[in-house]
Amino acid sequence: GFTRRKKTSLWFVGSLLAVSVVILTVGLAATTRTENVTVGGYYPGIILGFGSFLGIIGIHLVENRRQMLVAAIVFISFGVVAAFCCAIVDGVFAARHIELRPLTAGRCQFYSSGVGYVYDVYQTEVTCHSWNSRCQLKVRSNTCYCCDLYTCESAEPSPTYYEFVGVRSCQDVVHLYRLLWASAALNVLGLLLGIVTAAILGAFKDVVPLSRLALGPSAPPQILYSPAQQVLAYAGFCRPPATVPTCSSYPLPLQPCGSFLCEDAPPPAPPASSSGPPPRYAPASFLPGEKPPPYAP
């Protein structure tokens, strides 16, 4: 299960990284097409690409894998929000501020002088004809302008762009229009793919490999205490005590002395034995019916 989840996560993160690169490329191509049209569709590509890069690194890590995947999820989440905003902005701009009908009909002109060009300085004035009047329009070098989109009678700016500065031809405006819609579509794709990728990485960051589950954490060594083992262990270091003969080992002959036993009679000597030394304690004589005292070492 871990290997399958890892391959799935790599596939989604790699796909998101590829989409991020395409979003960045299309966005930069659109924003550098003209000078007076600013496109922000490449920002999600940077954020999503960085989050995907962190995700690929985190998937291959063994240690600190969870922290790296959490950072990747955070960046991908920010990229999803940016992709949503840029998709709306680019789509609305392409739909409301660029009109292709005069361009495709060939009613727009391209002015290119290339001599003495200074930024933000108009080079010439052209005459635009409206429905019942005409007016002068100032254009700069390398500008595609459409008199059909410019209203001479109105003092308010036109809602649609009637000139595009910094282009090489009017065909670049058509390319810009297509790039804007492509950027909006790619941002929507990055939005959906980013949500799915973040969810997959969120589930994968808590998965533990089977090998680590089999090994598990090393248990601390257990110290078993057994009094019997301790006694046996120390028994070899102590000398055994000398055996003391019990009272029943030697018979005690009683000598009659009238009607009672003589207490002053010396005890008989024990028989000689060649097997060992004589006992350390001599047995004492007791009266009939009297119990001997308990043994004390």
Image (cartoon, helix red, strand yellow):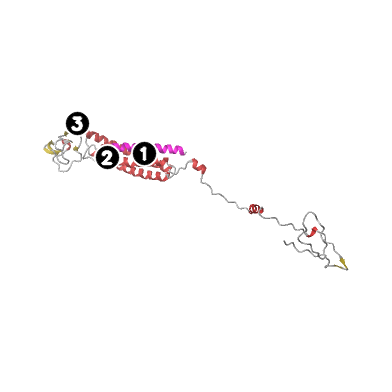
- Pick the residue in front: 143 or 196: 143
Q: Quadrant of residue 20?
A: top left
What amino acid type is highlighted by mark number 2?
Asp
Residue appearing at x 41%, y 46% in the figure: 67
The answer to whether residue 13 shows anywhere in this view is yes
For the residues labelled 2 and 1, say whether their Cβ atoms are less than 8 Å apart.
no
Quadrant of the rendering where the C terminus is positioned: bottom right
Q: Is residue 73 left or right of residue 210?
A: left
Label 1: element kind: helix
Q: Residues within 10 Å of mark 1 (few under 14, many from 20)?
A: some
* Residue highlighted by disc 3: 105
In the image: residue 166, left or right of residue 132 = right
> Which residue is disc 2 drawn over?
90
State the extent of the magenta-drawn residues as a range.
2-28
Residue beneath label 1, please?
A: 193
**Residue beneath the point at 19% across and 31% down:** 105
Is residue 7 within the magenta segment?
yes
Q: Which of disc 3 and disc 1 is earlier in sequence?
A: 3
Instruction: Work out how far the residue at label 2 is from the one at label 1, CA to CA, in angstroms.
Output: 19 Å
